Image: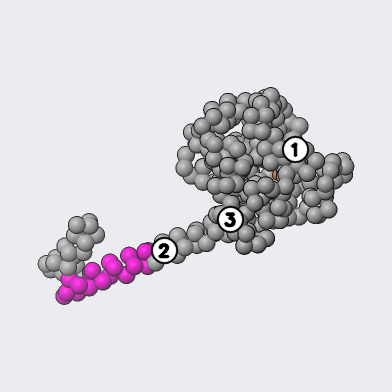
Amino acid sequence: MSPVVVLLARMYESNPPLLGNWGGWSVILFLIPLYYARFHWDEVVKLREAFNKTVDLLSNTIDAKDSHTFLHSERVTAIASALARAYGLDAAQINTIEKGSRIHDIGKIGIPDAVLFKPGSLTEEEYNIIKKHPEYGVRLLEPASDYLSETFDIIKYHHERWDGRGYPEGLAGQEIPLWARIVGLADAYEAMTAGRPYQKAKTPEDALREIEDLAGIQFDPKLVRLFREIWETNPAWRDREVFLRLYSSKVPSLESSSPPSLEREPETSQKSS
Ligand SMILES: [Fe+2]
């Protein structure tokens, strides 16, 4: 029997009664705050669920904006989540990394389409505009900082590089928040295997080789070692086509009622992701 029920029974039977001349008064007095606590908790859970759905909606919005990057945020999330688990992070941290991965490129909403979808190489000026998307993202989400502030480091620093040549602040090595290093690596692998309008997608093997070549240059060497280990055992995200096949049906297509195509156009450049 539940301890609360036992407690209520004792309160009811106490002689003399704790309150007034009837044991029921004590029970009623105890139940009122209990009811409100339960009501408040239900509201908190509902609010959290609604907010998680809003994050999913934002993620779908980013992916839908550019058909070249179909399911990009979802796949980055799957890779970053596996990497965070392999690193030994706890459930709460993995949850934050997943949330941050889903919306890491939200700032692209503030980048003009002519620059974002330009077929071909970017000029230096255009690249400088693209480089603003991490800071735009944080600014866009500032009003929701009560719920999302823990993801801000991911959004702001996912394009920093281990050698300090990334953006927006040129942080190096351990200065880059771990969560951003994890998402940055996942983002780069996803971009390499998705390709660009002017560059063919790399095979998973070639992309892995490039990631390993860039250990200690662009990526945290420890994360690259872990990445290699989980890459071997994770076909669900290792190969983009397998991932699209598994996940396409989970995201509503805006194009038609026909099944989502697995032959998407290549993705934008890694530089601009
Ligand atoms: Fe990005």
- Between the C-alphas of marks 1 and 2, the distance is 50 Å
Farthest residue in the bottom direction? Answer: 21
Mark 2 or mark 1, which is nearer the start of the sequence? 2
Q: Residue at label 3?
A: 251
Q: Amino acid at mark 2?
A: Asp
- Between the C-alphas of marks 2 and 3, the distance is 28 Å
Give the number of marks. Answer: 3
Q: Amino acid at mark 3?
A: Val
Indicate the position of residue 58 as horizontal and vertical percent values: 63, 57
Residue 167 seen in this snapshot: no
Q: Label for residue 42? A: 2
Indicate the position of residue 241 as horizontal and vertical percent values: 61, 42
Does 32 appear above or below 207? below
Q: Residue at x 51, y 32 (%)?
A: 233
SS at mark 3?
Answer: loop
Magenta segment range? 20-38
Colour scheme of this structure image?
one colour
Indicate the position of residue 203 as horizontal and vertical percent values: 66, 33
Mark 1 or mark 3, which is nearer the start of the sequence? 1
Q: Residue at label 1?
A: 200
Q: Is residue 18 magenta?
A: no
Mark 3 or mark 2, which is nearer the start of the sequence? 2
Q: Amino acid at mark 1?
A: Lys
Q: Is residue 22 magenta?
A: yes
Numbered disc in front, either 2 or 3:
3
